[in-house]
Structures are given as C-alpha cells and as structure tokens.
Amino acid sequence: SALVTSCTNHINTPPTTEDLAHHRWVLVNINGDTPLESGDNMVTLEIGENLSVNGNAGCNKFFGKAELSGEKFRVKNMGMTKMMCFGDVMDIEQAFSQTLSDWSNIIINKDSMILNGDTHTFTFKLDDWK
C-alpha cells in the first residue's frame, strides 16, 4: 500500500487579491537573461486598491485593472501613454505589455513575483514605497 503524506507548505497556493494589492514590483529579469539595470527606465508594476494597476513599461506609463483567476494573472483594458523611445527599451515594453495583457501563470514567493506567459517569463522583486 502507498503511504500518502500531506504537505503543509503553502508556498504554491494560488495568490490572492490580498497578496497582490498595495505592492510595487520592479522587473529584474526577462526569460532568465541578464538582470535589468535599475535606473530611469525601470519597468514597474504597481497594484493598488481593487486591483487597479499602473506603472512604467520602460518608456511609457500604463494603467488598467488586474484580473486573478486561480494561478493566472492578466491586466485588462490596459491603456498606455504614447511616447516614442528607441532601442532595447521598446522591445522590452512590447514584450511586457503583451505578456501583461494575456493570461500568465503567476507565482509569488515573499519578495519575488514571476509571471510566466506564452512567450516571456518576467521576474519581479518587491520594491514597496518607503
């Protein structure tokens, strides 16, 4: 007979609205590549009351409303400013806005959050307002 043990470690339970709300996340890594430099073009995701979302996609600021369904996360009705930037920052912004708009798997462990989308995986670190 097989012995079945219960695991009481809840690290992989789906995140709740409370886990997300009132936090600021900074993008530190895309697809496991070299960590992003912190600086003027920091990519941020800020989640507020009732899962309202805003932040900086690298060049442009964005806003919308987060949706959470089990272990899936997306931002619906995402709006964005229309500034023109050049170079890598636009590629990052395109990948970021596309991934946020579609359903991604979300994992939150204390001070990190991973969004694993169809094409890209984004790793954030918690960087709450001081």
Image (cartoon, helix red, strand yellow):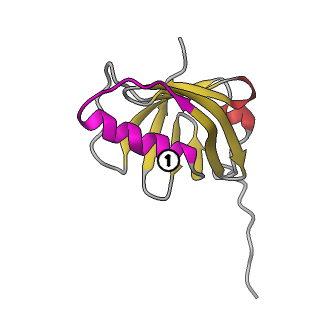
- The image quarter in which residue 1 lies: bottom right
| Highlighted magenta segment, given as a residue range | 79-101
Q: Residue at x 48, y 46 (%)?
A: 98
Q: Does residue 39 sit above or below 92 in this rendering?
A: above
Is residue 28 within the magenta segment? no
Name the chief secondary structure element in magenta: helix
Which secondary structure, mark 1? helix
The number of numbered discs placed on residues in the rendered structure image is: 1
Q: Position of residue 43 (x, y in %)?
A: 41, 29
Q: Position of residue 50 (x, y in %)?
A: 75, 28
Going by the numbered disc 1, the residue's amino acid type is: Thr
Q: 83 or 122: nearer the eye?
A: 83
Residue sitting at the far top: 130
Would residue 98 appear left or right of 69 to someone viewing this image?
A: left
Q: Is residue 101 above or below residue 48?
A: below
Residue 46, visible in the rendered structure = no
